[in-house]
């Protein structure tokens, strides 16, 4: 663990690391879970949400049905934008968000739709550029942190990856944002935080990245991805290891406290030799 943290701190210090942030980061400042989204869609459509909370259908399938019935995902996006908003005071008080700003990653990828990361950078006086579509890629400033909204942004309905078809389309990994990710990721260490690793898109992404390096003939030179998990999971560790992924485990059962403690230690080590 100590040597892995030192190696990770070194690439963070050299700004050769990518942060990939998931829903756990947003939930730390009070955003609702997917259950609330399912309950809202079920209510809007006149369906029993319990069928989707306990049955075989996923929230992506329900969102696909919502789009078919409503004609677009726009009304749902508007509700999410209103309901999933967090006050600036909460973001300012979030030690997790402050640590992410202080760690100074050149690239932050996130599957979260909200603007909490952007708000944190603004509140802490750090420049950034948001990338959610092809136009944003063309206009991006490479001198400041890029916050890449990998599953879309509330300001652009077309960018959102929320319904089943959206996820199926992304599984091909051929969109402009995917191409940018492959270019960014091949030469950098990726740190995943805020994920349970049950997200099929993320798991397939890790699998395909491992395949690319194996096919290249230079697998030994690959910067190994790192996944942070609050508690040990031997099954995940074994499966991720076959893709060359290192697992870093937290020190408490509380996901937010565990992640905060990990990032504080990472920042301390990154600054130690400056």
Image (cartoon, helix red, strand yellow):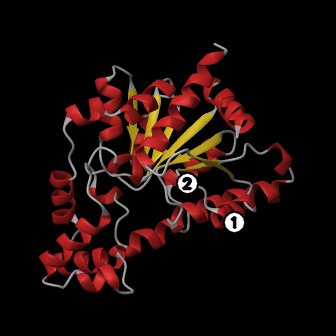
Which of the two residues, 165 or 105, is positioned nearer the viewer here?
Answer: 105
Quadrant of the drawing holding the C terminus: top right
Under tag 1, what secondary structure?
Answer: helix
Q: Where is 26 relative to 66, above or below?
A: above
Verify CB contact (< 8 Å) between mark 1 and mark 2. Answer: no
Please rate how many residues cluster around mark 1, counting C-alpha atoms within 10 Å: few if below 14, some from 14 to 19, many from 20.
Answer: few
Q: Which residue is mark 1?
A: 239
Task: Answer with left or right where residue 119 lies relative to residue 132.
Answer: left
Q: Residue at x 68, y 56 (%)?
A: 209
Relative to 212, residue 2 above or below: above
Residue at the far front: name it: 252
Residue indicated by mark 2: 231
Image quarter hosting the N terminus:
top right
Residue 268, compared with residue 28, is above or below; it is above
The residue at the point 29 percent across, 78 percent down is 62
Residue 252, position as x, y percentages in the image = 50, 47
* Residue 131 found in image quarter: top left
Is 39 on the left-hand or right-hand side of 195? left
- At 55% across and 26% down in the image, what residue appears? 267
Q: Is residue 149 visible?
A: no
Q: Position of residue 49 (x, y in %)?
A: 22, 80
Q: Quadrant of residue 135?
A: top left
């Amino acid at each position: 663990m100590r040597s892995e943290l030192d190696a990770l701190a070194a690439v963070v210090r050299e700004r050769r690391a990518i942060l990939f942030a998931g829903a756990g980061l947003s939930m730390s400042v009070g955003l609702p879970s997917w259950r609330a989204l399912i309950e809202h869609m079920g209510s809007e459509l006149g369906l029993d949400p319990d069928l989707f909370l306990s049955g075989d259908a996923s929230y992506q399938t329900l969102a696909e049905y919502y789009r078919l019935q409503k004609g677009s995902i726009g009304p749902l996006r508007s509700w999410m934008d209103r309901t999933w908003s967090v006050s600036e005071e909460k973001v300012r008080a979030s030690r997790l968000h402050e640590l992410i700003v202080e760690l100074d990653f050149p690239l932050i990828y996130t599957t979260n739709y909200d603007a909490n990361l952007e708000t944190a950078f603004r509140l802490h006086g750090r420049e950034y550029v948001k990338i959610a579509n092809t136009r944003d890629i063309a206009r991006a400033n490479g001198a400041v942190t890029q916050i890449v909204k990998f599953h879309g942004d509330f300001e652009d309905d077309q960018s959102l990856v929320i319904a089943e078809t959206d996820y199926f389309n992304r599984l091909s990994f051929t969109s402009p944002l995917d191409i940018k990710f492959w270019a960014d990721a091949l030469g950098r260490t990726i740190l995943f935080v805020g994920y349970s690793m049950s997200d099929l898109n993320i798991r397939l992404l890790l699998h395909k990245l491992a395949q690319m390096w194996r096919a290249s003939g230079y697998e030994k030179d690959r910067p190994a991805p790192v996944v942070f998990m609050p508690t040990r999971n031997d099954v995940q560790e074994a499966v991720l290891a076959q893709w060359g992924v290192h697992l870093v485990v937290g020190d408490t059962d509380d996901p937010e406290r565990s992640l905060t403690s990990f990032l504080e230690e990472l920042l301390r080590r990154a600054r130690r030799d400056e």
